[in-house]
Each structure stands twice: as structure tokens, then as C-alpha cells.
Amino acid sequence: MLKYVTMIAPLLLKRGTANPVKTLTGYMGAFFLMGISAVFFLAALFTWIASNYGLDVAFLAIALILMVVAIGLTVMARLSQSAAAKESESRNAQIKAILAAREDPLADHIPEELLTHPMSQKILAQVEEKPFIAGMTAIGLGVMLSRQIFEASD
């Protein structure tokens, strides 16, 4: 029990774990056991329905259960896709508004497909969240690149 509490406690406290591989292994084991338990539950349900109502009703009941689960998973996947698309559109609008508000002279030269690329959006969102760290990183990269360029030209 202590093992499960130590796995769940960091998730509840919104902190990372000391060993994420161990946590992921625990989740995989839990999903594996849930899958096996679902198979045994369906087998027991099939056996009970077949002994009480007949094989045709048992097959029909299991097929209906599996179809409802499949429809539920499909609906969940579509909802998550639409939520991701809405989030992406709102992030696009937010980034365009930020760039337009700053009247950045370089923003006119950045292609639209580069701004709408998911990786660029993640980077720009991180820059917006932590501008000081992003500025220091840019300065550090600029210094490193300039040294490399000037050393290569010698």
C-alpha cells in the first residue's frame, strides 16, 4: 500500500517523481491488469448469459458492450481532437495579437506557416511565459554562434 501511495502522492501534489520510469511501469502494469480483468469480466458475463439465456443472446450482449465501448472511445478521441484544434487556434490568435501589439519590425518578415507550426507556437508560448529566461537564452546562443562564426572565418 505504501508503494502505491508513494506513486500517487507526487501526482496529487503536482510534482515530478524521483523515478519516472518506475511510475510509468506502474501505470503500464495497472493498465495491463485492467485489460485482463475486463477480459475475465466479459468471459464471466458471457458464461452467465449463455447459461441463463442462450448463446445467441450472450454473443449479442457482449457485442453490444464492446460496440458501446468503441463508440465511447471514438467520441472521446474526437472531443480531444476538437479541443486540441480549438486550443491551437486560440494560441495562433494570441501569438498574432502579441506580435501585432508589439509592432515588431521583424514580424512582417516571418512566414505565416512558421508562426502556425506547433513547435514554433510552443516556443513562443514559453517565451511569453518567461521572457527574462528566453532573453538570456537568446543572448547566450548569440554569443556562442558569433564566436563560432568568427573563429571559423579566421
Image (cartoon, grey):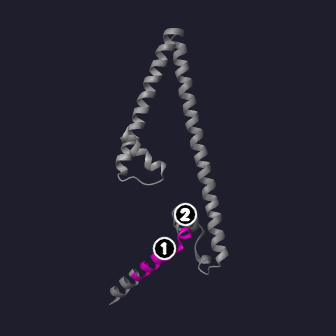
84 in relation to 71, above or below: below
User: Badge 2 is on which residue?
Assistant: 117
- Image label count: 2
Horizontal side, residue 87 vs residue 134: left or right: right
Q: Is residue 129 magenta?
A: yes
User: Badge 1 is on which residue?
Assistant: 133
Amino acid type indicated by mark 1: Ile
Q: Nearer the viewer, residue 43 or 21?
A: 21
| Residue range corresponding to the magenta coloring | 127-143
**Distance of mark 2 from mark 1, alpha carbons?**
22 Å
Mark before the other along the chain sequence, 2 or 1: 2
- Magenta stretch: helix, strand or loop mostly: helix
In percent of width and height, residue 13 lies at 48, 51
Quarter of the picture containing the C terminus is bottom left
Question: What is the secondary structure assignment of the residue under circle 1?
Answer: helix
How many C-alpha atoms fall within 10 Å of the one at disc 2: few (<14), some, or many (≥20)? few
In percent of width and height, residue 85 lies at 61, 53
Amino acid type indicated by mark 2: His
Q: Kindly indicate the quadrant of the structure image that contains residue 73.
A: top right
Q: Kindly indicate the quadrant of the structure image that contains residue 60.
A: top right
Residue at the image position 43 percent from the left and 32 percent from the top: 35
125 in relation to 132, above or below: above
